[in-house]
Image: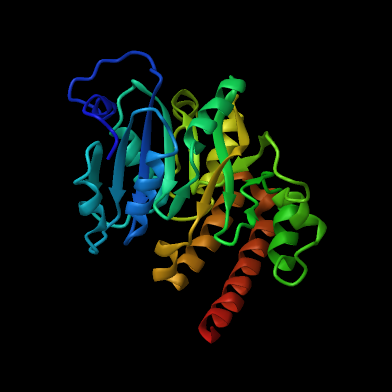
Amino acid sequence: MWVSEQGRAGIRRTGDSADRYGDGVGVVIVTYFPGQSLQHFLDTLCKATSREVGVVVVDNGSTDGAPEHAARRAGVHLVRTAANVGYGAAANRGVAELSRAVGWVVVANADLEWEPDALDELLTTASRWPGGGAFGPQIRDPDGTVYPSARQLPRVCDGIGHALLANVWPGNPWTRYYRQNQSPPRERSAGWLSGSCLLLRRAAFDAAGWFDPRYFMYFEDVDLGDRINRAGWCNVYASSAVVTHLGGHATAREPRRMLLAHHESAYRYVADRHRGLLWVPLLLVIRIGLAVRRRYLARHLRHH
């Protein structure tokens, strides 16, 4: 690993008394049976920045040996959770390992491939946005397709239209508004950014209250993006920085559990933002609709 012993200063020491944020960079990788993808992530990260960074791997109960193998590399610190605590809670655990000298934190999936200089480009973009709290790169699928990773915060009407029609009418107006992928990628502000790869300004992350651990999987990034906005910061799509998402190894292991988690998180996001008796009838309809959609998708999953 290219990280020197000096780079290890990014890992928190007992008694750390730093009273302000520094300009160091830390990378938190959440893993769950990552296989060879974790080594590939680290190999490509070497070419993504010229800076020294500390890496924290937070493992949610893997038994494939990949996190332990990665921890043999210089500058990589392994943290094991007691169980699979979910993505946001594990990311929080990793950030907690970093000192306040680390003013910039990357939170990412293990199944990413960094393009050369991508992390440096993220940091360069951040320098142009002093009010930016979170920065997301352009994320591509393995075939080169640009994934819509910088989206609008979902309103109730958009969420319902997207949930009902996205699979049968991908170009419906609610999905188009939500995904914001009608034009070529460009640097801009966004409602929220995909949590599969995020550069977070530590001050903004602290102000927003970190990830909400109630979201086991999915919508933890939507929720964080909303709270970053509410804390007075903005989310920025850094389209000039490019990563490739090679595939959801973790989610593919337990597709039915992930399907349930997705719909539970979707309901939690809506219910948290629409409290009070007036919203009860609509929330009931949404819960029923999500349950029907989940059963439909579960049957489709079984057939495939």
**Residue at (37, 57) in percent of width and height:** 37
Residue 249 placed where, x, y %? 41, 64
Residue 215 seen in this snapshot: no
Q: Quadrant of the N terminus?
A: top left
Residue 159 placed where, x, y %? 70, 56
**Residue at (31, 38) in percent of width and height:** 55
Compared across the picture, whether 160 is left or right of 125 comes to right
Residue 255 seen in this snapshot: yes
Above or below 93: residue 297? below
Compared across the picture, whether 93 is left or right of 146 comes to left
Task: Report the front residue among 15 and 56.
Answer: 56
Quarter holding residue 99: top left
Compared across the picture, whether 164 is left or right of 294 comes to right
Compared across the picture, whether 99 is left or right of 203 comes to left
Residue 276 placed where, x, y %? 63, 46
Above or below 248: residue 57? above
**Residue at (36, 49) in percent of width and height:** 30
Residue 142 placed where, x, y %? 54, 60
Q: Quadrant of the C terminus?
A: bottom right
Above or below 250: residue 119? above
